[in-house]
Image: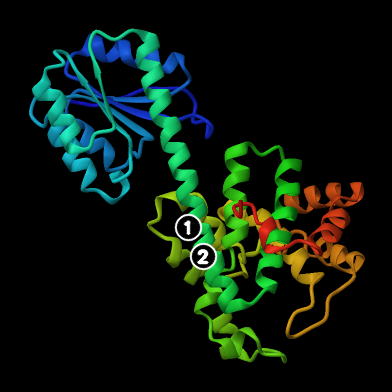
Amino acid sequence: MTAEVSGRSDNRGESSLLVVGKDSQSLAAMRDILESAEYRVVTAADGKAALRLLDEYHPDLILSDISTPGVDGIELYKAVRQRPEGATTPFLFVTERGTREEIFAAKGLGADDYITKPVTSHELQAAVRARLQRTDELMFVQLKAVLRAMVDAMKARLGEHSLRHVQAVNAYAQALGVELDWDEVELEALESGAILHDVGKIGVPEKVLFKTGPLNENEWAEMRMHPAYGAHMIEGNPYLDRVLPVVRHHHERWDGSGYPDGLAGSAIPEGARLLAVANAFDNLTSDLPYRSSLSLDEAHDEIVSNEGTQFDPSMVEAFERCWRRGDMAKIHKSVQTLSEEDLPFAS
């Protein structure tokens, strides 16, 4: 049987759902109910069709009939849980009869919840909304724990300066993101990317990290590996999927001469293009092992002079607007007195 894909525009703020059911009329009704609540919905007529979809599509929640032809809901649940990307995906069962056997089978497997037909529009939307909210809350707690552990490792390896640096980079990045009218989801991913952008330096030898003179060719080659090291460290963590491109590509250059992959122009992920400006501005205005800091005006001129070569012109334009309002100078002053407790996840 063929799977049907339907839904609204690909808005990053919406949640995507996979709904699986054997009855086409019931399936269409559930799709309409959920789309009316602004969810993006993909439907499949049985478990086999759903598994084919899951090869390329990763929904935020799966809602499946227990009884479907061929691969039934129970087998689908087991198959989803065996996939790395499906291990934490919320899974709700739908049962027509609500028998004790079916309910115990679903609960025994660890399913998140079940819904008994017939179900009203309000009940269906409420069940989906509640499950997604619980998942969001759990992901936030787990994300904080991951960030805390990684920042502790960075502090131990890179020193106290690394904490002030990530706080400053995040503050500059958030100002740019707001200036560009990014939504809450994008700003949250940007925050995590700013915190973790240098985590790969944990893998760089200390003699390179803390060398007081200029790096030689081999040392630069080692230093340029830190974005790839960082991406490898967070790869496969479902809470950091949106962060990985920022970590890997924040040292790419608009003209294609950056690292680690030599991406150019719009091929560089947007978050990485933004973070490149924020990261550079803080580095330029900070004392580093191999050079003293520049003044704010000198750092500003350096950013502007590299528009279209190192930096995305649209990001430099946003930086300029923030600069003219005095935002960057205010942030620079404020981050000088921040402590570890001021990190976004410290509370």
Position of residue 4 measured from the top left corner of the image (x, y, whole percent): 28, 23
Does residue 241 appear to the left or right of 208 in the view shown?
Answer: left
Residue at image point 46% right, 37% down? 136
Residue 295, quarter of picture = bottom right
Q: What element carries label 1?
A: helix
User: Where, quadrant-wise, is the N terminus in this rendering?
Assistant: top left
Answer whether residue 39 is visible to the viewer in this image: yes
Q: What element carries label 2?
A: helix
Mark seen at residue 342: none
Does residue 105 appear to the left or right of 41 in the view shown?
Answer: left
- Residue holding disc 1: 146
Label 1: how many Cα within 10 Å (few below 14, some 14–19, many 20+) = some
Mark seen at residue 150: 2
Pick the front one: 243 or 309: 243
Position of residue 149 measured from the top left corner of the image (x, y, whole percent): 50, 63
Does residue 326 appear to the left or right of 107 in the view shown?
Answer: right
In this rendering, the answer to whether 9 lies above or below 155 is above
- Tag 1: amino acid: Val
Pick the front one: 78 or 40: 78
Work out how far the residue at label 2 is from the one at label 1, CA to CA, in angstroms. Answer: 6 Å
- Tag 2: amino acid: Met
Residue 133, quarter of picture = top left
Residue at image point 51% right, 65% down? 150
Pick the front one: 234 or 132: 132
Residue at image point 16% right, 13% down? 96
Position of residue 119 measured from the top left corner of the image (x, y, whole percent): 29, 10
Label 2: how many Cα within 10 Å (few below 14, some 14–19, many 20+) = some
Asked if disc 2 and disc 1 are in contact, CB closer than 8 Å, the reply is yes
